[in-house]
Image (spheres, rainbow, N blue to C red):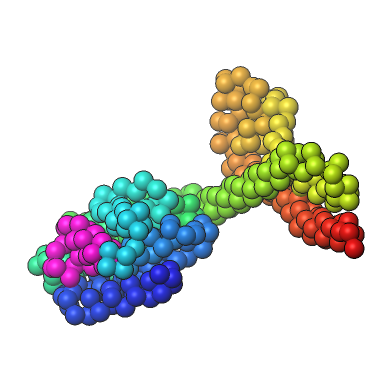
Amino acid sequence: MNEEILLQDCKQFVTDLFEDKVSRGFFFHNIRHTQTVVKAVEDMAIYYQLQGEDRLAVLVAAWFHDTGYSQGVGSNHEEESVRIAAAYLEKKEIPPAVIEKVSKCIMATKMPQSPNSLIEQIICDADLSHLGTQDFEKESKLLRKEFSSAFNKDISKKDWRKENIQFFQSHRYFTDYGRSRLEPVKQEHLHEMLGHEKEKDEKGADEKNKKDKTVKEQHIPEVKSPVSEKPEKDKQKESRTERGTATMFRIMSDNHVSLSQMADSKANIMISVNTIVLSILVSVLFGKLQYYPQFIIPTIILASVCLAAIIFAILATRPNITRGTFNKEDVQQKKVNLLFFGNFHKMDLPDYDWAMKEMMNDREYLYGSMIKDIYFLGIVLAKKYRRLRTSYTIFMYGLIIAIVAFIVAAIIGTPS
C-alpha cells in the first residue's frame, strides 16, 4: 500500500475513533492534540530528512499514540494504543517490522519517557511540544480541566502551578530540534511561572508585614540610602536580557554544529559513491580497454571526475588543528578564544584553569569569546560548504560529460 494512502486511512480511522468512542471529558487528550502531535512529527521528519519505514512508522505512531483513551483508561493508555494500532495495521497487511517500530514509538511516550531511537525521540518531543510553544497556557488549562472532568481530580491553581514547575524542571527534550526550537520558549514559560510564584509569596509576606506595622513605624521618616539601588523592574529586565543572550548563543551554536554534521554526512556520501565507481572502473573496465580502445578517453574522464570529487569532499571534512598554546599576555589583552580547543589543547591544566577563571570574571571577554567562537565556526562552515558544493558540481557535470563521451564512443566504435 502507498504510504500516503495509508496515512490518510490512519487519519480517518483515528478521527472517527475519537469522535465516536473517546469521552468528551478528555479536553486535552482529544483529536486536536493528536493533530498537533502529528504536525510536530511532520516538521521534525522534514528537519531530519526521514524516509521510508522510519517516516511511516513515526507518523502512524503519532496518529495512534492516544487512541487508548477510547477504552476510558488513563495511566496505561499506551498499551491499549499499541493494541489498537497493531490490530489496524495487521488488517492493512503492513510488515511486522513497521508494526514493531510503531509500537515502540507509542510505548516510548509513556511517562517517564524512554526513547531509544531517533524516531522514538521525535514522537516523545512532539507529544510534549506544546510546552515549548505559545499555546502552553491554553493547553495547560485544558489539561487541568481534563483532570477535573475525566479523573475527578480538583487541583487548585497554586498546586497546579507548582506541579507544572516541577515537571518543567525535570523534563528535557531529546532531539536537537527540540532543544534548539522548543526549549527556549519552554524556559520562558518556566521563568514566568517561577516569577508568578515568587510574586505570590512576596505579596503574602507584604500583607503580613503591613498587619505587623505599628502607627509609630508608619510615621518614621524614610532615610534614603546615599547609593540608590536598581529598581526591581530594571533587575528583572536585566535578568531577561541575560537569559535571552544565553539562549541566543546556545541556539546559534547548536545550529552551527548541526550544519557541520550535515556537511560531513554529505561529504561521506560523495566519498562513498565515487569510491565505489572508481573500484568498478579499476576492477572491471580497465582490464577490458585493450579490447575496446574507443572507451579509453571516456574512462579517463569518468575516473578523473570521481577522483576530483573525492578530493574536494575530503578537503571539506579534513580537520585543521592550530598551535594550541597561549600566554598570559594573550589572556590579559583578550586576544585568545578559550572556548575553542585548538587554542589550548597543548596547555597545562593549571594555566587553562587560570585563564578560564579570568575570562569568566570578565563579562566583556566572555561574550567576546562566544561571539568569536560562533564567527569562526561560520567561517569553517563556509569553507566546508564551498568545497562540498564544488565536489557535487564536479560530480554532476562530470558524470554527464562522461556518459555522453561513453555514448559517442559506443556509436563511433560500432561497426557499420
Residue placed most toward the observer, 18 or 221: 18
- Magenta-span inclusion, residue 77: yes
Q: In the picture shown, does residue 284 fall above or below 231?
A: above
x, y percentage for residue 355? 61, 28
**x, y percent for residue 209:** 22, 56
| 35 falls in the magenta region | no
Q: How many marks?
A: 0
Q: Is residue 58 left or right of residue 13?
A: right
Q: Which residues are magenta?
A: 64-89
Front-lying residue, 402 or 379: 402
Question: Would residue 411 be visible to someone looking at this image?
Answer: yes
Query: Looking at the image, is 335 positioned above or below residue 78?
Result: above
Does 355 sit left or right of 175 as displayed?
right
Identified at 57% across, 21% down, the residue is 349
Say which of 353 and 149 sits in front.
149
The residue at the far front in this view is 416
Left or right of 297? Residue 60 is left
Q: Is residue 397 above or below residue 355?
A: below
State whether the magenta stretch is mostly helix, strand or loop.
helix
Considering the image in quadrants, where does the C terminus appear?
A: bottom right
Residue drawn at point x = 56 percent, y = 36 percent: 361
Tell me the residue at 18%/74% (across/down): 22
Q: Is residue 336 above or below residue 348?
A: below
